Image (spheres, helix red, strand yellow):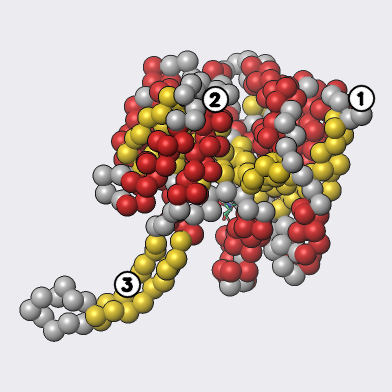
Amino acid sequence: MGKTTLKIAALAGDGIGPEIMREAIKVLRAVEKKHALKLDITEASVGWDAVDKEGKALPDSTLAVCKKSDAILLGAVGLHYRDAELPKEKRPERAAYLRLRREFGLFANFRPIRTHPALAFASPLRSERLGEGIDLLVVRESTGGLYHAYPKKTEEVLDARRQGAKPGKVVRAIDTMAITGSDVERIAHMAFRAAWLRRKKVTSIDKANILETSILWRDVVTDVSRQYPDVVLEHMLVDTAAMQLVLRPTQFDVILGENTFAEILGDEAAALVGSLGMLPSATLGATQQGRTFGLYEPAGGTAPDIAGKNLANPIALIRAAALMLRFGLGAPEIAKAIESAIDKVITEGYRTKDIASAHDVKERQVGTSEMGDAIAAAI
Ligand code: NAD
């Protein structure tokens, strides 16, 4: 039987992007040697790196590489100390990152968050709250909601509330929270399908006691849940969820929410693990002809404070590469091989600086490239 081929656009980007991308590709090449798989990897520039080389954050040539690929593996983009060089719509965060999401219709963000028993010390929570460990998945609708709906503007209006006093002008800023039933329906299906492969529980987040959008959200999610009788659905208000994540994080399996709510809860959950350097993220579009196009990246950013020093933890991007094989190629067993290799090196004591405890004598503090070598060797 011929090998399955996956075409990957590898966009390293800025800051620690190139260092962690090098390690992710190293691990993917090790995977390729062991499994019936051919990886066709094309590297292209993005972010400030692309601004410097080609004059814009997402050059047409890079977009063309992405369009010919089955998946995008992204390091990270953005360097806030360079922001003054370009207007905000031309900076990498908008002109490259958000553009890629729009261009490929990427609407479903997945952030798996899991603690490794050997890294429990890195969590700000006491060990009794971590129990057997946190293992949850945040599924976030990422094209609608408060971030993307219009009108979005800042204007001057007469302040009608200044009773007694002469009405004066005030500045008012408006964001809009809007969501359609079909947006909720498609993201809910993604969450239920994911839960079905996990511990079969979805906690849907909203603010249905106050917001119209949340009432629609709750109704549609409840409707969709009828198609997944094996999966337990629970509704939780976003403020309660923020509290429960800290009090009893192990109660959660899949957390499903609108863009803003799920982003905030996702970052809160990420903090419980202790380092951004461990956490991957996948943003998926619709499935066509059995394949799902997606953008796979670390949950963290470009980490300019440690860039170029061989200090960055490459595990977030290596885990993102595993997600790419799971969702983009439909090869969960190969994804699992990467995840097991990571668990193995952590158990053996390999630590980049962000996950080092300083108390454990079995630890071996390593740099970015040594961590990549160890994981590639463990494949
Ligand atoms: P950041 O995530 O880059 O860094 C926050 C902290 O986490 C830093 O102390 C950093 O050293 C640490 N960290 C992050 N990733 C790490 C890793 N792999 N290994 C070890 N430590 C790691 O957030 P920031 O400093 O607020 O943002 C820096 C830049 O990144 C900004 O320009 C921002 O816009 C951009 N950013 C990009 C993305 C993206 O490309 N998707 C996401 C978030 C932030």
Labels 3 and 1: the sequence-earlier one = 1
As helix, strand or loop, the secondary structure at mark 3 comes to strand
Q: Residue at x 10, y 75 (%)?
A: 163
Q: Nearer the viewer, mark 3 or mark 1?
A: 1
Q: Nearer the viewer, mark 3 or mark 2?
A: 2
Near-viewer residue (374 or 67): 67
- Pick the quarter of the image with the N terminus: top right
**What is the three-letter code of the residue carrying label 2?**
Trp
Q: Residue at x 36, y 51 (%)?
A: 213
Ligand 1 contact, mark 3 (Cβ < 8 Å): no
Picture disc at residue 1: 1
- Pick the quarter of the image with the C terminus: top right
Residue 186 % position (x, y): 53, 43
Q: Which residue is mark 3?
A: 172
**What is the three-letter code of the residue carrying label 1?**
Met
Picture disc at residue 196: 2
| Residue 343 in which image quadrant | top right
Apparent side of residue 377 relative to residue 269 in the rendered image (left or right): right
Query: Cα distance, mark 3 to mark 1?
Result: 64 Å
Labels 2 and 1: the sequence-earlier one = 1
Query: Cα distance, mark 2 to mark 1?
Result: 30 Å
Near-viewer residue (136 or 294): 294
* Image vertical order of residue 86 relative to residue 18, above or below: below
